[in-house]
Image (spheres, rainbow, N blue to C red):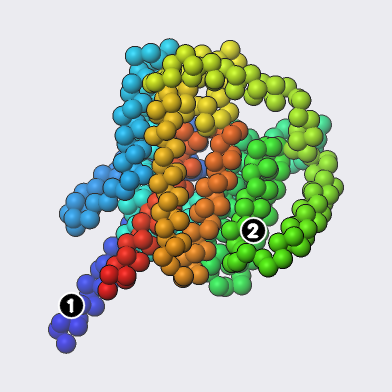
Amino acid sequence: MLYIDRYSNSIREQYLSMSFWRSLLFLFILSATTLSYIEGISKLVILYGLCFSFLYIIHSLYIRNLRLYPEVMIYFFWVIWCLGGYPVAASKVQFLEGLRTVIQIAAMFFVISGQTSGDNKASSTAMMGLLLSGMILAVFSFINGELTVAAELDTRSRVESITGNANSFSYQMLITIFAVFYLWTDFRSFSIRVFFVLVTAISIIGIIYSGSRNGFLSLVAFTFIWYIYSKKKIPKHPIVTYLILILIFTGIYFFATHLLENTLLWQRISQFEDNSSQTRLSLYMEGLGMIKKSPIFGIGLSNFSVLSKTGLYSHSDYLEVASNTGIIGFIIYFSIYIVLWRRLSLIKKITTDSFILYKVNIFKTAILTILLFGFGKPHITSKITWIFIAIAVGYTSFVKSRISHFLKM
C-alpha cells in the first residue's frame, strides 16, 4: 500500500511538473507573438525568454534529458556562419542588431523544440498559444477602429494591428489558421469546434483587410495543398476528379471576386503593375546584385536595407538569406526545412495511425505554404515562423522516438 501511495505521488508530481512547463511555454509563446511588438514591453518579453531558457536548461541537465535536434544544431551552425559577414557589413550596428535577433531565435528554437519533444501535450499547448495570439491581434485591430477604416476602399488603409506591418499581420493570421487545423482533432466538443470555425473566419477577414496579396494567395495555396494531402488514396478516375476541382476553384474564384471586389486587397491583386510591384522587382534585382558582389559570406545580417536604394528589406526570404549570409549560408539555412521534411516523410512511412498522419499532413502543408510566403516576406528574423518550426521539430521528434521504441519491442 505504501508503494502504491509513493507511485501515485510520483505520477502526480510528474504531471504537475509537466503542467508547470506547459504553462511557461504557453505564456512565452503568447507574449513573444503579441507583447514583443510593443516598444518597452518587448524588453520584458526578452527577459522572460532568457529566464525561461535558463530554467529549462538547468532542469534538463538535472534530469539528464537535454535535447538538441539536428535542425537546432544546423541553426546554431548557421548563426556561427553569419559571423563571417561582420567584416564586410556596411553597417556594423545593423549587423549586431540582426545577430542579436537570430541568437534569440536560436535559444527559442532550442527550448521550444526540446519542450514539445518531451511532452505529448506540449505541442497542442504551444499551438493554442499561437491561436490565441492571433485572436488578440485581430481583436485589437477591431477595438482601435483600424478594421473599420480599412473596410473603406477610398482610405487605402491596411490592417496592421500592433505588428506595425500589414504583411506581418496577415502572416500571423495565416499561422493562426495553421494552429486551428492542427488542434482540430484534439477537441471533439461541438462548442470548441464552432469556436475554431469562428477563429478561422476572423483570420480570413484579417488577411483580406490587411490588403496583403501574399497572405491571401498563400491562404489559397494552403487550402489547395491541404486538399491534396488530405486525400487518403489516388482517385480511380483522376480526370473526373480534376474536372471537379477545376469547377470548384472556378466557383471559388467568382465567389471571391464578388466578395472582394470592394476591398483594397482585390484592387491590389488586380493591379499587378502598381508601384509596389515595381518596387519589389527592383528589390529582387538589387538582391541578385548583392549576391554576386559577396557570394560567400554575404553582405552581413540586416544589411540589405542599408545597401538598397529604397532603404527597404528584400521582401523575400530567399534573397534576404542569400544576400545577407551568402550562398553557403543559404544552403545551411534551408537545409533545416529539408531535415524536418525528411522526418515527416519517414513518420508517414512507418505509421498507419490516422491521428499522427493528420498532424504530419498539417505540418507538410504549412511548411510548403511558409516557403511560398517566403517569396514575398523574409522569415530570417520572424520569431513566429521559428516558433512554428520548433513545434514541428519537437512533435515529430517525439512521435519518431515513440514509434521507434514501439518497433523495437
* Mark 2 touches mark 1? (CB < 8 Å): no
Q: Can residue 131 be seen in this view?
A: no
Please tell me how crowded label 2 is: few (under 14), some (14-19), or many (20+) other residues with Cα within 10 Å.
few
Give x and y (percent) for residue 265. Answer: 74, 38
Q: Residue 102 carries which label?
A: none
Q: Indicate whether 113 appears above or below 324.
A: below
Q: Kindly indicate the quadrant of the structure image that contains residue 119.
A: bottom left
Q: Kindly indicate the quadrant of the structure image that contains residue 54.
A: top left
* Secondary structure category for the residue under label 2: helix
Looking at the rendered structure, the kind of residue marked 2 is Tyr
Task: Tell me which numbered mark, 2 or 1, is placed earlier along the sequence.
Answer: 1
Looking at the rendered structure, the kind of residue marked 1 is Arg
Q: Can residue 78 be seen in this view?
A: yes
In the image, taking residue 106 as reference, residue 191 lies left or right, namely: right
* Secondary structure category for the residue under label 1: helix
Q: Which mark is residue 227?
A: 2
Q: Which mark is residue 6?
A: 1
Q: Which of marks 2 and 1 is in front?
A: 2
